[in-house]
Amino acid sequence: MSDYSWFEGIPFPGLGFKTKIIEEAHKFLIRDEDTIILTYPKSGTNWLIEIVCLIEKKGNPEWVKSVPIWERSPWIETEIGYKMLNDKEGPHLMSSHLPFHRFPKSFFSSKAKMIYVIRNPRDVLVSGYFFWGNSNLVKNPDSLTTYFEWFLNGNVAYGSWFEHTRAWLSMRERENFLLLKYEDMKKDPRRTIEKICDFLEKKLEPDELDMVLKYSSFQAMKENNMTNFSIINSDVIPSGLKLMRKGTTGDWKNHLTVAQAEAFDKAFQEKMSGFPPGLFSWE
Ligand code: PPS
């Protein structure tokens, strides 16, 4: 198990990350033609990448079934991803979990399109506990109680959910920023794909849309070795640890105690005040 790599008070995973790369990434040149998938970890990043890749290929699954997901949409803050983006000519499709103030600053004066996904942070917490807590990427907590404390204090990979989300949501009125919710994606994946197509100015025929839907389903992604992280070295992700764990909404109710749920509500109200009601519509 690795400890975190701390950078400016934010814990990053201990494997595959270097302070130098995080600093360099801040200066990366984002161009108007680029597309960025931005999330706080465990919010549905890989689901969205799969959808965008399938839209790009009009539903043909060949690309998603033959190239690892981290090569199709490299993570800019990782050692491997940063190199890939530098070596490859644009336009780029890229992913990131970086907090607002560490993201490449060129983005903020560009027309590059960003899709930001939010998910009920209670489910993010539970998903993170099972994934990070069993991987060798970060310090593993001894229990959910410990991880719960870390999460509320922002001492988990990529720092505080509350700060990450508050800062990125400040972009939500921008034309080149599409805000999606994991809960809406679950409820109506077809509508979500249509929304993404509109935003990316891509037109799909109905049968092409059906294919995007089919190959980005939880089951299809779970079975796709180019997507499900099973080909990552077991020193990093122990075999048996599943990225596609449950893929549901509200799983937190099976794991948090009543006292934890109340403490979470209190922290949420304190830290997320000021946003319009309805923005965080999840159970
Ligand atoms: S990571 O490691 O931060 O990039 O993880 P991320 O991809 O953001 O989030 C992983 C969770 O997303 C769920 N997932 C899906 N849900 C529904 N449908 C599809 N197709 C899908 N693909 C991934 C995945 O199961 C993780 O959530 P949990 O709750 O742990 O199951």
Image: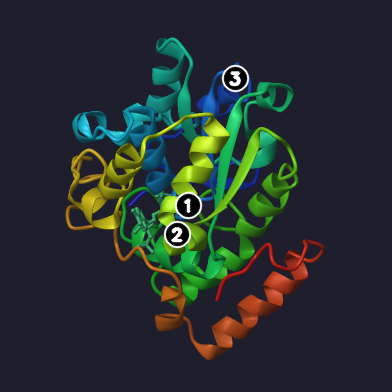
Measure the C-alpha gap from mark 1 to mark 2: 5 Å
Q: Is residue 265 above or below residue 212?
A: below
Type of the residue with mark 2: Asp
**Residue annotated with mark 3:** 30
Q: Is residue 215 left or right of residue 75?
A: left
Q: Is residue 261 above or below residue 22?
A: below
Q: Decide: marks 1, 2 in contact (CB < 8 A)?
A: yes
> Where 280 sits versus 206, above or below?
below
Residue at 67 percent of width and 40 percent of height: 100
Q: What residue is pinned by disc 1?
A: 191
The part of the image, by quadrant, that contains residue 22 is top right
Residue 71 lies in quadrant: top left
List the residue tagged with mark 2: 188
Q: CA distance from mark 3 to mark 1?
A: 29 Å
Please name the residue shown 48% across and 16% down the image: 91
The picture quadrant for ligand 1 comes to: bottom left
Q: Position of residue 81 (x, y in %)?
A: 41, 26
